[in-house]
Amino acid sequence: MVRQVLRRLFQLLLTAWGIITLLFLLTRTLPDDQQLLSRFTDTTTGTTASGEQVRQAQQARLQRLGLAEPVFYASRATVPIDDEQLLISRWHWNGTHNQYHHWLRDVVHGNLGRSYRTGEPVAGLLGSALLITLPLSGLAALFIVVFSLLLGLLLASRPHTGWVAMGLYTLDSMPLFVVALLLLLLLANPDFLTLFPTYGLGLDNEAATSLPLILTAPAYAVLPVASLVLTGLAEPTLQLAAALRHELQFFYILTARAKGLSSGRVLRRHAFRNALLPILTLYTELLPNLLAGSVVVELIFALPGLGRLLADAAAARDYPVLVGGVAMVVLTRQFSLLLADWLYQLADPRIRTTG
Amino acid sequence: MKSFLSGLAAFLLCGVGLTACTTPSAGPPAVRIRWAQDPQTLEPLTATSSQAVEVINLRHCSLLAGDYEHGRFAPWLAESLPVISRRNSFTLLTYTLRREATWDNGQPVLARDVAFTLKVMNCPRLPTEYSRTQYGVILDIELDAANPRRFTLVCKGSSQNVIIASGDYLILSEHSLDPEAALRAVPLPLLRADTAAALRRYPSLLNLANRYRSIPPEKQPGCGPYQLTAWAKNQYLRLQRKPNWWGSKLNKPPRWLQAQAEVLDYRIIPDNATALLALRRGDIDLYPEPPAQDFNRLRHSADSTKLLFSVANSYDVTMVGFNTQRPALKDPLTRRALSMLFDIPGLISATQPGLAYRSVGLINPHDKPAYNDSLPLLVFAPQRALALLSQAGWQQHPDKTWWRNKIQLVLNIIYKAGAADHEAIATQLRTTARQLGVLIKLRPQESTLLRRQMQSGNMDMYVHTLNGTPYAYNFFSIMHSRGIGMINYPRFQNAESDHLIEAITAEPNPLRQASLLRRFQVLLQQESPVAVLYFARHRLIASRRLGTVQAISARPGYDATQLQLASARQ
């Protein structure tokens, strides 16, 4: 068992490492010369730097950030052939003096690098963003699981609940940003209802209120969490209802009913466990999906979370932050797959991964 | 399950109830301003965003400040504009600092702080790539032994831009960042010329660089009117006016030395719809640069009585540029023909109703002396465009397409993806051109990619908004042949134009400079490397808590030092 878990863990880390390496190489091969150039060109007063001066400044910046070194252990370079004064393209071995090696060495030591924009450690930036995103996504995931179980059982047990399914299909067809804006315009709008705050976490109002954050934060979390829950609820609910209806057609259900069990008991005690299997993957992928989808909610409700951090980093070509953030999402997804495997075995002991 | 549902209901009720509690009852004394994004860093050497520049200018001072009312630079930390003299081929600019100017701890701002700043801007192991180049005209600084507030900058060049560059960087505090005065012994010319030699001779430079990096920029002391009291990244940033702000001790302080608001509270709200709701609910006081449609809708709604609206002519010009190095666009006639396909009044009323105005060229029409009002505005004349195309040697085939030297007139136009006004311009051009048989392909691009494409000339046409300033005209980077490969996006190369740009930059006399600018506009209209569509107006919406608010021509469209709560005015 331990060997099997270790083997699975090794596979998981290998996959994550492969994806992150690919991302690292892709980002580092994209030129990043626009930030400094824009600073020179946006300056419309004072002296004007020449093209050559700007190129020198860009080279100095690359040197400072360690981006002037080769990207990988081997690279293709054009070298002259002395005799015939010709150029030829050849593979060149760069040794350990390359950006990837330095980055990997730092990562192994727990250092994800520093943001190009702010100079702050990437780990710190990710950590503070996660403090917002994790509670938000975790709460949304919890609500989705609970509500989908309740609604799934309701849809499977009651024949006249088509309107619920129709409502869920409607929600499923709506993009997250539409749902978030609708909630905002309905429930935080002076023209309709002003039940909830418009944006942020209320930290900027600390001077105006004497209530501690733990009491004020729920009010600010309602709309963002509701947006995530409403758009994420339909799929697991409808899948669970379909799986339950499928299970209810089997003979063991008939046997249970023949024993005199109530419909609810048959549904919950007998059909439910078997019906749960197909949607376990959906549940375990909730968190990584919500992490990735939080960017929309965080932008609309002005929350300083992981999604916004990654969106800003991508727009500003802040590659260390981008690679660190994506690595976190990749690892979360890999662990969710591992969790799904484990839950499968827990739900149905007949399922065993063979060596 | 019932208990869960009850818990959930209680949670929601709590949320609703506490919202009422968290709504400020009396209101804080702060002026709350909406920002779309966080400044990210307040490091003076690397900060690029307009938000960062705004905060830095409220915490620190430069020698000179932009006087947007009169469109010129004026003394800020300096007592007066520099006294100019010559020594061989160098220009000497002698400044004297204001007697009243002090740091946060009350120590006076001295000439040695300016010398320290210039050395930091050239110090190895610091992110000085921009400052080394941008302020490279300052070769040396000479301190006056008799007056600790007086110094002379030795500069190369003598243009107005050199004078602006000599005073356009904020001053850092030597006693806080270099208490051991390690930089005093290092000559500025050595730091500028050979950093490796400077490091060998003065190893203490490394300690200084480490010390500088170890102090967070937000904790660096400043000599400006405000201090940073709180900053939660991507949430808010709060500035508090210094209790003994030295500017208030001046007799009739100029506008840039005033600080009206006691507290400036910047709220970071990325989404425009959310920001608008926050303004209408009274959660923020100032919403700068709302989308034109939102601004007009709100101005004509019931909310107009609860809010204040202000607009000001800006120097932000929207244009379509032609890549003059492309064979199809090499001749001015073709470019002029294409310029006639823009329905500019229609575009303004569709995208910026009442919030943009037309111009014959790159000069703002409100700059009366320099604006050449004898030139005609661009007209929407597709039939005249056809005649011009024929004149340029293009021939129309039976299938209505245009050909010249076996090249078909098919062009692509790039613009920023998601910019509705730019997209409207490109779409209108495509529709009109298609009716004439000219095929235009739309290529929306992500902003960094767009900039790269324009820089490398990998396009036929582009839509661009150029952000100008009221202070000086500098066409070197955008129209001089030296700017090709940088932001001379049309890749425009013309000997007469280059000569004129150089003359405009070097001319100290405003009247003669205005005359040169008028000639430059004539040349640009003849050559048509760009079709200038309109200048935009800055716009502000504010809550009535502010009493009055005035949009300004310079970016960001408002003057934070002049904002004040109505209650504080009484």
Image (cartoon, grey):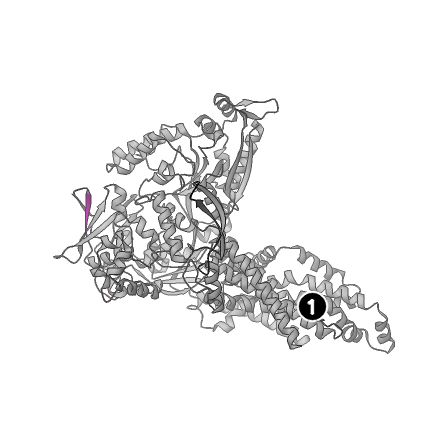
Q: Amino acid at mark 1?
A: Leu
Q: Can residue B163 be seen at all in this image of the molecule?
A: yes
Disc 1 crowd, CA 10 A, few/some/many (<14, 14-19, 20+): some
Residue highlighted by disc 1: A280
Name the residue at the front extreme: A83
| Image quadrant occupied by the C terminus of chain A | bottom right
Q: Can residue B557 be seen at all in this image of the molecule?
A: no
Q: Determine which quarter of the picture holds residue A222.
A: bottom right
Q: Position of residue B376 (x, y in %)?
A: 40, 28
Badge 1 marks a residue whose secondary structure is helix
Is residue B92 highlighted in magenta? Answer: yes
Is residue A84 highlighted in magenta? Answer: no
Q: Which residues are magenta?
A: B90-106
Q: Residue at x 31, y 32 (%)?
A: B500
**With respect to residue B81, does B33 lie above or below?**
below
Closer-to-camera residue (B66/A285)? A285
Q: Position of residue A38 (x, y in %)?
A: 40, 48
Task: Give the chain of mark 1.
Answer: A
Q: Position of residue A228 (x, y in %)?
A: 60, 62
